[in-house]
Amino acid sequence: MACPPQGYSTAPVTRHARPAPRARLRQSGAAAALGVVLASLTLPAWSDGTTTAASDIAALLPTARRTAGELGNRLKTQLQAALAAGGPMSALEVCQTVAPAIGHDLAATFEGDVGRTALKVRNPANAPDAFERGVLAAFAADAAKGVDVSALEHAEIIVEDGRRVFRYMKAIPMLQTPCGSCHGVSIAPDLLRGIQARYPQDAAVGFVPGELRGAFTLSKTLR
């Protein structure tokens, strides 16, 4: 994707003195051939004595995957149309104006937060929180081992401020089209000036196709 949407941010995860109970799912290229793989953790029952974190993840995961997929597809469609109509500068405008609206629309349907983040962001407001940074680091480590970035995802239920929160992240691979013009190794000078004018702290350049670009990130507070 050409840039993170404006206005998306997440609060830092509140850690407790004692580790909060959690269950998580990680899937990589190897795991994809075997289906969903749950981490080898003891999955505690929550206070109602019937619903486990694992079953909550299983129930929420399909919707999270669909939402992340729709975000990616809609952004890609808009960016490709902008590139065809007006070139990279038009795509940059889409990132600044259209992308936040898409994320807001999907967040309302998901009933949570929906956006993108990365270890190298264009908009500093979208820098990863502690949870997201840890997952992105794990994605980067997997990618360095040769795992297909497009197969990486992470789902987990954590505790924030005493409330259970479902978190989901889906890795975004760098694509030459439509991402290369604005995030690649070689960026046209006039476009680079336009990027720097909008995002003076931009760090989201120098990516090569197939590299980890960032991740779609979703969260939902559970009742």
Image (cartoon, rainbow, N blue to C red):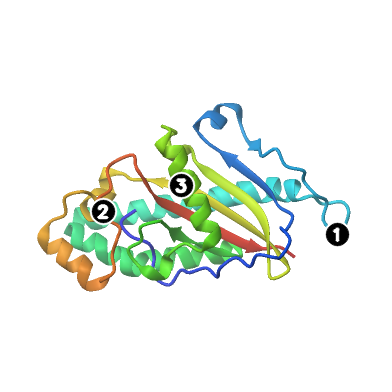
Spatial distance from mark 3 to mark 2, Cα to Cα?
Answer: 16 Å
Mark 2 residue crowding within 10 angstroms, few (<14) / some (14–19) / many (20+): many
**Image check: 142 left or right of 205?**
right
Report the front residue among 156 and 74.
Answer: 156
Secondary structure beneath dot 2 equals: helix
Instruction: State whether residue 223 appears in this view.
Output: yes
Q: Quadrant of residue 116?
A: bottom left
Residue that numbered label 1 is attached to: 47
Eyeballing the image, is 53 above or below 190? Answer: above
Report the front residue among 167 and 102.
Answer: 167
Residue that numbered label 3 is attached to: 171
Q: Position of residue 36 (x, y in %)?
A: 63, 35
Residue that numbered label 2 is attached to: 183
Mark 3 residue crowding within 10 angstroms, few (<14) / some (14–19) / many (20+): many
Point 35% across, 66% down: residue: 98
Q: Position of residue 41 (x, y in %)?
A: 72, 42
Give amino acid for label 2. Answer: His
Q: Quadrant of residue 160?
A: bottom right
Report the front residue among 30 and 91.
Answer: 30
Quarter in which the C terminus is drawn: bottom right
Eyeballing the image, is 145 above or below 196? Answer: above
Eyeballing the image, is 33 above or below 172? Answer: above
Mark nearer the N terminus (1 vs 2): 1
Give amino acid for label 1. Answer: Ser
**Image check: 69 left or right of 79?**
right
Give amino acid for label 3. Answer: Ala
Q: Position of residue 60 (x, y in %)?
A: 66, 51
Return the residue found at the far left. 189
